[in-house]
Structure formats: structure tokens, C-alpha cells
Image (cartoon, rainbow, N blue to C red):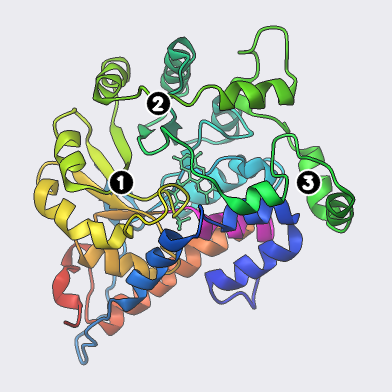
Amino acid sequence: MKHITCIEDLRELHKRRVPRAFFDYADRGSNAEETLRANRDDLQRIKFRQRILVEVSKRDLSTTILGEGASMPLILAPVGLLGMQHGDGEIHACRAAQSAGIPFTLATMSICSIEDIAAAVDKPFWFQLNVMKDRGFIKSLIERAIAAKCSALVLTVDLQVIAQRHADIKNGMTVPPEWSLSKILDFASKPAWVAGVLHGKRRTFGNLVGHLKGTEDITAMSSWISSQFDTTLNWKDVEWVRAIWPGKLVLKGILDVEDAELAAKCGAQALVVSNHGGRQLDGARSSIKALPEIVGAVGAKMEIMLDSGIRSGQDVMRALALGAKSCMIGRAYTHGLGAGGEAGVAKAIDLIARELATTMGLCGINKIREIDDRVLAV
Ligand SMILES: Cc1cc2nc3c(=O)[nH]c(=O)nc-3n(C[C@H](O)[C@H](O)[C@H](O)COP(=O)(O)O)c2cc1C
């Protein structure tokens, strides 16, 4: 990984090593991808104040996230189907995060189950919950996360209606995949990926195994999942989750200040300003644009995290300067995973850490808590 110098290099390797349907599933956004682009464009428009001759020999990226020590203000976001980017992908990503001293969030729609991860790592991880129609199943998932000693529950609140990603339809990106000659040839040209996935613990939705009585059939599971997205979901359901989950609760997918104010009243410790990485409401504004207003309204009451578009340490610095306490990354580490498993995820985290340390140095900053809007050029 010596010649990998930025997340884009990991993305290029990911593209070469993983079948196109899975690469595109990770890489692309919804509809016309306006919001996907806005996330990057708006971050890159934010410029720093270069400061000189400030002693920066004692730079320290450490911070706290939800009251726990972390080596830097970064979290691996929940990403579905990581085990299809690399065999046992969720375990690889969790191990890399824990070695780096940052939290990993396991998605409900993961390939490895909650119990697979708990058995494979020593430290607690976070669990992300989609509230689906079958509330009995959701309650049992929360209980499994409690039994696995997950240290935070991330409740995703922007998935009530699923947006369309054109690339997934064109690529027949279904679980199980729709087969075509070009897809078979594509898979055949990625033998290392095929071997990795075949040797992985599972090739299906690990958290659902055993739930659909009498079938482990992946087609049956997929159609059950698509029937489970719940358009009736509302703030009462958040109260219901709050009553069952005793630990730290994070609401993920807030972009509007009125929603942030409601979130601050529901007993959650944190919220993630997020547009799901440009995969949901196309035409929504970028997360970084939404951030300052939300920090102003509820930043004193809750911990504010941000995701969507973070690809570098410079981006983390931008979000922190506008009031986020930490950032989540989705694609940045998924590219690392597709490029090189655990080592690739470790590389992604290390790249961002180094970039953040350099940016702090060139802005005359030594500590994470010193970062505020004074580091920005107006
Ligand atoms: C391939 C992929 C799958 C995702 N799956 C989930 C998921 O299952 N649950 C969830 O809450 N968010 C999911 N997300 C959204 C991420 O948690 C995060 O919000 C997003 O990736 C942040 O944007 P970024 O990729 O630009 O960093 C997914 C994102 C990607 C790229």
C-alpha cells in the first residue's frame, strides 16, 4: 500500500478489484446524484487560514466520542453489505477501526451478524438499527445488540422511503445478483474477490438468519426486507426504541433544524447531520451546509456528528471548524475495504489521520478542541 497516497487511490483499487455491481453500489448516489456532488463541492469550497510560525510540535488528534476516548474524531459509519466488498468485510473493518482506536458501526443490513462480530473482536462496537414493520424482530435485534454489549445504538431516521440508485438497477444489483453474461465475466476476472467472499462466514444477511421461519433462502430474505420499509415511522417509534435501548442513542440522518430540535427532546445523546452520503433525497442540501444551523440550535444539548462527503483529513477539519464534534465516513473506508481488506481500511483511517495532523499543523493548531471557525478563511 506504499503508493496509496489518498482515498482516491483506494477508490481506484477498489474499482479494479471488486465486481462492478458492488463497486457501483458503494460509489454511486441516488437519482441525478446532485446531492452526492454537492457534498463534495460544498466541502471543497471551504478554505483554511494558513498560519505560520506557531509551534505545532505537540499536535494531538485525540478526543472523546460519546464520552469515550478516541484516537481521533472519526467513526466508521454503518455500511450495508460490507461482506460483499470483501469476504467477512464487517470483521475486517471493525478490527481496523478498533486497532486505530475509533468506533465501528455495524449495519442492520450487514453480511456478518452482530454475534459474528462480537465473537471476532475484543472491544465493544456500535450497532445501527433500521426500524422495520416487524417490530417484534426489531425488538429482538435491540436485545441482541444489548447482549453483544454494543456501546451505542445508531438509529437511522432517513430510510423510511428508499430512493432509486439508477446504477443498481442497471447493474442488476440485487441480493442474490441478477446474472448476465457480462456479470459472470466480470466476476470471473476478480478471482481474489471471489475466493475471499466464498471463504467468508456468510453470503447473506447475517442478522436475519433464523428469523424467517423455514427458510435461509436469500431471495426470500430480500423480498422480506423490501416489504419491511415502514412509511408509518414517526417520533413515537423513536420513543419506543428509547424505552427498550438502555445505552447511548444516536439519531442518524438529520438535515433540518426543526428535526434537530425534535431530536434534542427524544433522549438521544447525539445526532448525525447526514444526507446518507447522497443516497436518499436527491436535491437535498449538502450536510456541511446544514451543519452550522443545527449546531447553533442544539449543539449545546447534544453531540453533533457529521457525515456525507468526507474523503480527507482536510474535510474532517472543515466539519470540526463548523461545529461538528466528530465525523463519520462511509465510502472512504469502504474503498479501503474493497482495495485491501483490513489493511485497506487501516490505510484509509491512517491517511485521514495524517492529513488532519498536517492540516492542523499548517493552521497553527495543536489540539482538536482548539478547532473552530477561526481556522477558516472568510
Ligand atoms: C454502500 C453504502 C451502504 C450504506 N448502508 C447504510 C446502512 O445500511 N444504514 C445506514 O444507516 N447508512 C448506510 N449508508 C450511509 C452511511 O452510513 C453514511 O451515511 C454515508 O456513507 C456517508 O457518506 P460518505 O459515503 O460520503 O462518507 C451506506 C452508505 C454506503 C456508501
Q: In which quarter of the image is residue 209?
A: top right
Q: Mark 1 points at which residue?
A: 272
Q: Residue 231 — which label?
A: 2
Contact flag, marks 3 and 2 (Cβ < 8 Å): no
- Please name the residue that numbered disc 3 is placed on: 196
* Vertical comparison of 173 with 243: above or below: below
**Mark 3, other Cα within 10 Å: few <14 / some 14–19 / many ≥20:** some
**Magenta-span inclusion, residue 183:** no
The nearer-to-camera label among 1 and 3 is: 1
- Asked if residue 221 is positioned above or below residue 256 in the image, the reply reads above
Q: Residue furthest top?
A: 213
Residue 57, can we see it? Answer: no
Residue at (64, 29) in percent of width and height: 205
Quarter in which the C terminus is drawn: bottom left
Going by the numbered disc 3, the residue's amino acid type is Gly
Quadrant that contains the N terminus: bottom right
The stretch in magenta equals 329-341
Q: Along the polypeptide, which appears first: circle 3 or circle 2?
A: 3
- Label 1 is placed on what type of residue? Val
On the image, the x and y values in percent for residue 377 come to: 19, 82
Q: Does the residue labelled 2 lie within 8 Å of ligand 1?
A: no
Q: Tell whether position 331 is magenta.
A: yes
